Image (cartoon, grey):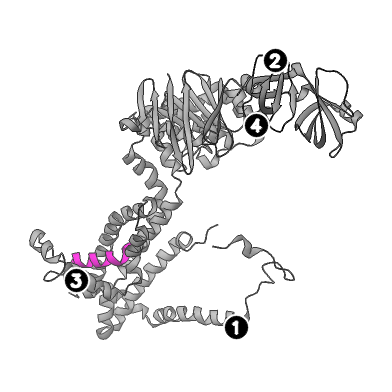
């Protein structure tokens, strides 16, 4: 099962790049609100037409405006789990799950039997006759999943599957969802939560303002973020600059000494907060980069502390609580941050 | 609609409830206004010679009028539904220039004097010199004037706006994602409409139909102008009430009570839906 989508869809003033290849795997589309994630899913399901380009599923063209092809949602074999689930309020859980089977011509009795099967699989055998308004958020999420899976779609789309749940249900459902999504087939899920992406997906596509910024595994993305949004998501310092002769000149004019001399030209730079040291005064040692600045935030994370520093090179450091106490860090204090040249990752833009 | 700002407590004033009392002159006028509505109803109930009401309702003339009214108003409701639901659909979901013009056109009969409506219907459907009337008569043999069909048409004309308005509101409040969900589950457009849209629209549809029926049942002006006043064919209950008032006031009163009872029942059944008392 392979989905190949390459095109654009316009929604409001935003042109969303619908640019995605999904084989038998789970791909997470990660991005901030308003990036066009839901629009992307809706084009795959046939709920929003492409303006340019083409979508194919296992070689069948689903949408190709230039060729005048558009397959209606009902004929696509693309399942959808909507944000806040959208269960039919006038049907009980069993009839909700059976709806797709009934629409595709399965007999009433057989559809009910299979619906009960699916409800049992998601652990809701007892709720078959419950109306959606009598179910909890976690339960409606599972009914919605069972409803989408019951038609055995070739591609399954999930729009923020965990966003409507409270914190406790999230952890539980996330684990269960991972189990249910493990079955073969192409799956695309949209989320703004990097934890969802890391736990559920094999691969991540970062979508920002309608454009695909980066794709890869969560680990690859965490190591080499290609935008400030991604760096913030994975908790990394990120800069852009021009590299030459083991030095990177940042946009603001500051320079970094880096160990990697192979990469030159316009580059991204990432520095993990744990490799940033803090000092009262500039220490010695030529292999180190020093930036003086002012502390703006000090956030405790158990035995570690995140310190945000504004200056010529704004940077976030993560140090031990003990070190923070020793330095007496508080907002407004002056401080010097240091990073070893070997701890700086440089990669082409 | 009450804006959230209107509940902001003003300085130097108690919270809503005791402090925000309505001024006395306003209360006095409001009581007068309420009495203006209540008195005619009281009069109707007081004047009725209850022992005779049952007998009056049994007279052939009265029963013919009631039967005709029931028949025609139900047909009018059905026609208003069949034509009104698509209009509501177009108004709620369509995106085209002149939509507000279409809405104004459809809602016009609500504010138009019914007699004018009757004259207009004559101008369009009159057999001898209407716009399409002669053609309808020559081609299909349909005659509206002095016929039940004419009564149904006149009643539909005045009743349909109530249905369109109610159903359009329901349609606008409907979350289109339910229809999207049905589509992704393999339901074609007709199945989606039948199994999802209509189900979700059900309450609005019922309310709109009930209002339209009540309006059709009470229709007088357009009916008498357009369809005439022929006993057993176009003399509906309101027309009978008007005529009986001269010859047999007791029967007129009895029929009025029937119409009043119907209105009250519809009103009570719809109190939450139509009159905006939402919890």
Label 4 sits on residue = A228
Task: Identify the residue at horizontal 41%, vertical 68% (top origin).
Answer: B264
Q: Quadrant of residue B122?
A: bottom left
Mark 2 vs mark 4: which is more N-terminal?
4
Which dot, 2 or 1, sits closer to the camera? 2
Label 3 sits on residue = B123
Could you tell me what secondary structure mostly forms the magenta stretch?
helix
**Distance from Cα at disc 2 to Cα at disc 1:** 87 Å
User: Which labelled disc corresponds to residue B174?
Assistant: none
Foreground pick, B266 / A294: A294
Look at the image and tell me whether residue B259 can be seen. Answer: yes
Q: Is residue B249 left or right of residue A191?
A: left
**Distance from Cα at disc 3 to Cα at disc 1:** 49 Å
User: Which labelled disc corresponds to residue B25?
Assistant: 1
Q: Are marks 2 and 1 on the same chain?
A: no
Q: Are marks 4 and 1 on the same chain?
A: no
Q: Are marks 3 and 4 on the same chain?
A: no
Magenta segment, which residues? Answer: B148-160
Above or below — where is B66 with respect to A300? Answer: below
Q: Name the image quarter holding the C terminus of chain A.
A: top right
> Subunit of mark 3?
B
> Subunit of mark 1?
B
Mark 2 touching mark 1, by CB under 8 A?
Answer: no
Which dot, 2 or 4, sits closer to the camera? 2
Q: Residues within 10 Å of mark 2 (few under 14, many from 20)?
A: some
User: Which labelled disc corresponds to residue A260?
Assistant: 2
Helix, strand or loop under label 2: loop
> Subunit of mark 2?
A
Look at the image and tell me whether residue B212 can be seen. Answer: no
């Amino acid at each position: 099962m392979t989905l190949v989508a390459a095109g654009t869809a316009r929604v409001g003033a935003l042109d969303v790049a619908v640019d995605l290849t999904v084989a038998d795997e789970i791909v997470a589309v990660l991005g901030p609100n308003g990036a066009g994630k839901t629009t992307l899913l809706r084009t795959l399901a046939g709920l929003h037409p492409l303006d340019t380009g083409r979508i194919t599923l296992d070689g069948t063209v689903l949408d190709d405006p230039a060729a005048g092809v558009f397959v209606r949602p009902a004929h696509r074999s693309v399942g959808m789990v909507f944000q806040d689930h959208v269960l039919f309020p006038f049907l009980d859980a069993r009839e909700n799950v059976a709806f797709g089977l009934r629409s595709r011509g399965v007999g009433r009795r057989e559809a009910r039997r299979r619906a009960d099967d699916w409800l049992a699989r998601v652990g809701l055998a007892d709720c078959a006759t419950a109306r959606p308004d009598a179910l909890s958020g976690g339960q409606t999420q599972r009914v919605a999943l069972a409803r989408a899976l019951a038609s055995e779609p070739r591609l399954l789309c999930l729009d923020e599957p965990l966003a409507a749940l409270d914190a406790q249900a999230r952890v539980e459902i996330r684990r269960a969802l991972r189990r249910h999504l493990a079955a073969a087939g192409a799956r695309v899920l949209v989320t703004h939560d990097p934890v969802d992406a890391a736990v559920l997906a094999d691969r991540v596509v970062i979508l920002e303002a309608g454009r695909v910024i980066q794709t890869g595994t969560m680990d690859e993305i965490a190591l080499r973020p290609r935008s400030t949004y991604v760096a913030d998501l994975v908790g990394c310092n990120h800069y852009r600059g021009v590299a030459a002769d083991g030095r990177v000149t940042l946009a603001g004019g500051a320079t970094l000494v880096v160990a990697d001399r192979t990469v030159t030209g316009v580059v991204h730079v990432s520095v993990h907060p744990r490799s940033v040291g803090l000092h009262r005064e500039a220490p010695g040692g030529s292999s180190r980069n020093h930036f003086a600045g002012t502390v703006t935030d000090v956030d405790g994370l158990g035995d570690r502390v995140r310190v945000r520093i504004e200056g010529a090179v704004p940077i976030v450091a993560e140090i031990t609580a003990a070190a923070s106490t020793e330095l007496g860090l508080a907002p407004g204090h002056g401080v010097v941050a240091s990073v070893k040249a070997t701890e700086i990752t440089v990669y082409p833009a | 609609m009450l804006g959230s700002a209107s509940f902001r407590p003003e300085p130097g004033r108690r919270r809503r409830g005791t402090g925000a009392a309505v001024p006395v002159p306003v209360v006095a006028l409001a009581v007068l206004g309420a009495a203006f509505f209540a008195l005619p109803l009281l009069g109707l109930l007081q004047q009725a010679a209850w022992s005779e009401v049952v007998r009056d309702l049994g007279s052939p003339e009265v029963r013919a009028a009631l039967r005709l009214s029931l028949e025609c108003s139900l047909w009018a409701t059905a026609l208003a539904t069949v034509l009104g639901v698509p209009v509501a659909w177009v108004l709620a979901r369509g995106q085209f220039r002149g939509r507000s013009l279409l809405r104004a056109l459809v809602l016009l009969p609500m504010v138009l004097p019914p007699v004018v409506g009757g004259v207009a219907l004559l101008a369009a459907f009159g057999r001898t010199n209407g716009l399409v009337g002669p053609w309808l008569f020559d081609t299909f043999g349909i005659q509206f004037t002095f016929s039940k069909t004419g009564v149904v048409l006149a009643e539909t004309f005045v009743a349909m706006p109530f249905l369109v308005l109610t159903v359009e509101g329901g349609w606008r409040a409907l979350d289109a994602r339910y229809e999207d969900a049905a589509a992704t589950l393999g339901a074609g457009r007709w199945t989606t409409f039948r199994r999802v849209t209509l189900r979700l629209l059900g309450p609005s549809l019922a309310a709109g139909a009930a209002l339209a029926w009540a309006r059709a049942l009470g229709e007088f002006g357009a009916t008498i102008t357009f369809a005439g006043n022929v006993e057993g064919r176009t003399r509906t209950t309101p027309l009978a009430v008007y005529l009986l008032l001269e010859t047999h006031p007791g029967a007129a009163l009895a029929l009025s009570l029937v119409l009043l009872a119907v209105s009250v029942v519809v009103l009570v059944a719809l109190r939450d839906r139509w009159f905006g008392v939402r919890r």
